[in-house]
Amino acid sequence: MSKPFELHSRAISRRSFLIMAGGFGVAVAFGGLPGSALGATVAPTVEGDYRPNAWVTIAADGMISIICPASEMGQGIMTTLPLLVAEEMDADWDRVRIVQAPSDAETYGNPGFYGIQLTGGSESTRGYYDLLRLIGAQTRKVILASAAAMLNVPARELTTEPGRVMHVPSGRTLGYGEIAADGPLPEPLPQATETDLKPDDQWRYIGRRDIPRIDVPSKVDGSAIFGMDVQLPDMLYGAVLRAPVQGERPGTIDDAEARAVPGATHIVPLSYGVGVIGETVEATRRAKDLLKVTWSTSSRVRNYTSSRLLEQFRSVARDVSQTGIEAFSKGDADAAIANAAMVIEADYMSDLVCHATMEPMNATALVNGDTVEIWAPTQGPTGTQGFAAEVVGTTPDKVKVNVTLLGGGFGRKAEADFIVDAVSLAREVEGRPVKVIWSREDDIRHDKFRPLEAQHIRVGLDSDGNIAGWRHRIVADSIFARTNAELFARAGGHDDVVTEGAHFNYAVPAHRIDYIRQDNGLDIGFWFAVGVGYTRFAIECVIDEIAAAKGTDPLQLRLELLRDQPRGRNVVETVARIAEWDRERDGRALGLAYSDAFGSHCAQIAEVSLNRATGVIRVHKVWCAVDPGVAIQPRHIEGMMIVGITNGTGHALFEQINIVDGEVQEGNFDTYRVIRMSEAPEIEVAVVPASGSPVGGMGQVGLPPVGPAIANAVARLTGGVRLRHYPFLPERVKAALEA
């Protein structure tokens, strides 16, 4: 299905815009912007009548409700974003309640995603950072204006402390609750500009380590509401049988046995499958298993065999006569390589991988005439509104989306297929809510996988061993061709999320990146770090190959190439220091990799051992140094790095989807291998923010460097054996050792 949005763009102008929310307006102008018991709580609804803007409401008892516009899927964003508002308005964090934003992109859309509501791309903090700080500053100005009227003093004589306005000359104070109860809202509402923001040396909350995530207590005590937990009166359940090959349609349907299942109430033919509605989850699952369906045989995906196609992709990448889309060009890379004293060439490949979120896809929908209400663990409320409206034949403004907590997302829950399931079935039983829950097998076999891809890199070195030219060719299908065809067309057929990360900040005089699309019909999608996860694999491994060819320490080579990048040099130097890069290890080796993606800088070193007889790699420890620009919550950043490194280790060693003649071969965790607790490395993280730098994204930063760090460690351990194919399966490692 085509999607009316995309997951990677910061093209919107941030110079100025007007935030409107009902009768509340805030003029926002940007001037050249490039406790032990401390903690807010989560609340289901807003309370209070004092509303300085659409984001903040203050109750008479002093409780402050702050809207969180992004989806919480374990990255801590439900704490981070409201904290920015609380910081600037001088809220008492112990008196704050966080409320999930309603589906209202005009009010709560992300400036980093063209103003739609969407969580992904490590864009939430970057997209909302300036806006929410200004919302907080504007809220404080409204509170001060109200207090000035109540105290009959000029607002310039007032200051604030958390939750309280102070008039120092008279010694009088007013709590925010008192102002909410009796204070008049000023007319017109004051405006906020950059000059109203606190300098960082006055921050009370930003940068503190003792502010816990507000979503954790409910997850510990079991009261948290994920999509799977939604319960509504008179609710039915649903399941959908999909074709074993993507794109096929049901032909004949024998549902006699399915209809006989106790509790099964409806069998619903769909354009892409067969739905079952029932009184219980068990009834729908049983009936679904008893359906006998013949499927069409016209899908192009029937010709999709991943192992064969990957070899084809590699051949295309090597064949310079097959031209693609120029994604980036600086200097004349071809001429520099042609005149080089030495040329290094390498192929790097990655298999398909699935998301395998802990919480499988699910959604609950209620259809009444032309109105729809949805409860779902979705990353994209705006997209959800659009697709639900399309199913029912209504308009997006008549679709209400209630975003629950997400049991993992990684880009998968930005899709709408599970939403379409729930709305399609709810339409059949108008007036009764229907909850659709995918089985784990459905979840894995019908995922939107990270694309199969092959890369070919040619690097020319001059007579001194310096890089003269770098040519990078990336062969893969397009995500945007499916999710945002208009953007894909405007870009001339380039997909910048598929090639993301190939444009690095190393000092290379001539550099060219080409994208060559291979369209084989399979839907692919956004997966944790997307393109950066494999482009940095290739780049960072080639950097080590260059260092070996020069006889140079790979650490020193990176520092040389980052000579104009102080933030990059700092994380590389920091991780080398904490890992003791120069210390010899008995039977183990260290590998290094660096990434500057998502606006943050991250360097990692992996300590690895190898069983040569079995080909099994063991990652013992990973050190990480990360520069997020502004470290809003340092302890939470450490947690996100641990998540990224753990997932990245599993993805590099184990994760693999195989498709044969269009059918996915894996179906559950017995066949789709993920990292186990006993295999997770020890992880040490150093957060080294750069003062004065813009805030960077964090959610996906930890994953890209760990795979190449592992591969580089194996190369050092084995005297130069290069692993160039994700994942590093034992049989692949043994083959590389024997080559």
Image (cartoon, grey):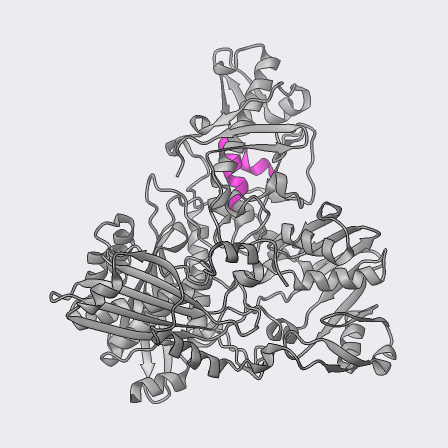
Q: How many marks?
A: 0
Horizontal side of residue 666 vs 103, given as left or right: left
- Image coords of residue 156 (percent x, y): 48, 15
Image point (47%, 53%), residue name: 122
- Image coords of residue 134 (percent x, y): 50, 32
Up the image or down, 691 lies above or below 175; here it is below
Up the image or down, 86 lies above or below 169; here it is below
- Image coords of residue 379 (percent x, y): 60, 55
Viewer-nearest residue: 127 or 652: 127
Horizontal side of residue 585 vs 642, given as left or right: left
Up the image or down, 78 lies above or below 560; here it is above
Horizontal side of residue 49 vs 72, given as left or right: right
**Quick one: quadrant of the N terminus?**
bottom right
The segment highlighted magenta reads 80-96
Horizontal side of residue 231 vs 467, given as left or right: right
Q: Main secondary structure of the magenta part?
A: helix
Up the image or down, 138 lies above or below 97; here it is above
Asked where in the image residue 298 lies, by quadrant, the reply is: bottom right
- Image coords of residue 650 (percent x, y): 45, 72
Image point (25%, 53%), residue name: 569
Magenta run includes residue 94: yes
Asked where in the image residue 734 lies, by quadrant, the reply is: bottom left
Viewer-nearest residue: 335 or 130: 335
Residue 109 visible in the picture: yes
**Quick one: quadrant of the C terminus?**
bottom left
Image point (52%, 51%), residue name: 76
Magenta run includes residue 402: no
Image point (64%, 73%), residue name: 440
Residue 97 visible in the picture: no
Outermost residue toward the front in this view: 321
